[in-house]
Image (cartoon, rainbow, N blue to C red):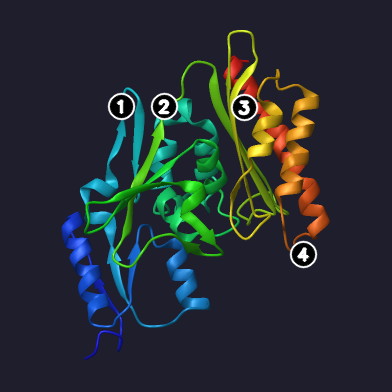
Amino acid sequence: MSANAGFAYVAPKSVDEALSAISNVQARGGRAQVMAGGTDLIVQMRAMDKAPRTLVDLKGIAETRRLEVGAAETFIGATISSAVLNEDPRLVKMFPGLMEGADLIGSTQIQGRASIGGNLCNASPAGDTIPALIACGAVCVIANASGGREMRVEDFVVGVQKNALQPGEFLLGIKLRNPGPRTSDAYLRFIPRTEMDIAVAGCGVALTLDAKGICTAARVGIGAVAPRALLVPDAAKALIGTRVDDAALNAAGAACTVASSPISDRRGTTDYRRKVIAVLCRRAGAIARDRALGV
């Protein structure tokens, strides 16, 4: 039987085993698809992509399940479920906005398997954790046969359901610098329903304030308003050097509107999404500011 004649499943126990499995399938002309949680995968296979493949399940690899909160940085393995992350008080305290994004991935049952790593690799423009990861300055740790590489989240997603992984690579985990004093983040999205819906627009904001309450650093990520989630440097510039007051927040929101290039569909028009993303930026920025101030 040829490699692309049917479906197969492998569950490697180490990074090397996973790389070897992927390489072997691809060398035979087959399709290897890496699985972190699998919640999006099953839906996609039923609805729009029924082509045969070999599923490479990463959950058996210790490194992809590693959660390490160090003195300077935090590592989150690619397969750790949202449910596990949201129950960790250290993460909720350090990265409240990112955990807000993780808590929006599906229902309680889905969160038992769904992961930030899977949400990122799926590369949906409306993925809730991606703008939040961008705001936090997250870095992707990628495994490959050459010893691995790293890249920022805003560079990892390159299009609609397209990421920057090369053949033979997979996402090992995500690295974040631990926040310093008076630093915090927030994530907000808008959906037509009260829960379990895809974002019409989403915005993550991370801020650092000095002892006088002046913003010294900022990052703003937006989602569902362009083919991929975006870092918005002009929104950050509007906040830095201010007390993150209404004028600064309005300017940051306007920058998000300018940076966006949304589509119109039955869930929202282009103009509507551009207005909503500005509102979300203002509100998320105010929440991040208050958290940084300890309010």
Q: Crowding near pointer 3: few (<14 within 10 Å), some, many (20+)?
A: many
Left or right of 36 in this view: 125: right
Give the labeled residue for mark 3. Answer: 288
Q: Earlier in the sequence, mark 4 or mark 2?
A: 2
Give the labeled residue for mark 4. Answer: 264
Residue lying at 55% horizontally and 54% vertically, measured from the top left: 127
Q: Crowding near pointer 2: few (<14 within 10 Å), some, many (20+)?
A: some
Is label 1 in a helix, a strand or a loop?
A: loop
Q: Which mark is residue 70?
A: 1
Q: Earlier in the sequence, mark 3 or mark 2?
A: 2
Q: Quadrant of the N terminus?
A: bottom left
Q: Earlier in the sequence, mark 1 or mark 2?
A: 1
Is label 2 in a helix, a strand or a loop?
A: loop
Is label 4 in a helix, a strand or a loop?
A: loop
Q: Quadrant of residue 285?
A: top right
Q: Position of residue 30 (x, y in %)?
A: 29, 81
Q: Position of residue 186 (x, y in %)?
A: 59, 33
Q: Crowding near pointer 1: few (<14 within 10 Å), some, many (20+)?
A: few
Calculate the distance from the C-alpha at mark 1 to the C-alpha at mark 4. 44 Å
Whether residues under marks 4 and 3 lie with C-beta atoms below 8 angstroms apart, the answer is: no
Q: Which mark is residue 161?
A: none
Picture layout, residue 97 above or below residue 198? above
At label 2, the amino acid type is Asn
Q: Position of residue 188 (x, y in %)?
A: 64, 40
Q: Earlier in the sequence, mark 1 or mark 4?
A: 1
Calculate the distance from the C-alpha at mark 3 to the C-alpha at mark 2. 15 Å
At label 3, the amino acid type is Ala
**Residue with the most extreme right position:** 271
Whether residues under marks 1 and 4 lie with C-beta atoms below 8 angstroms apart, the answer is: no
At label 4, the amino acid type is Ser
**Residue with the most extreme bottom position:** 1
Left or right of 142 in this view: 288: right
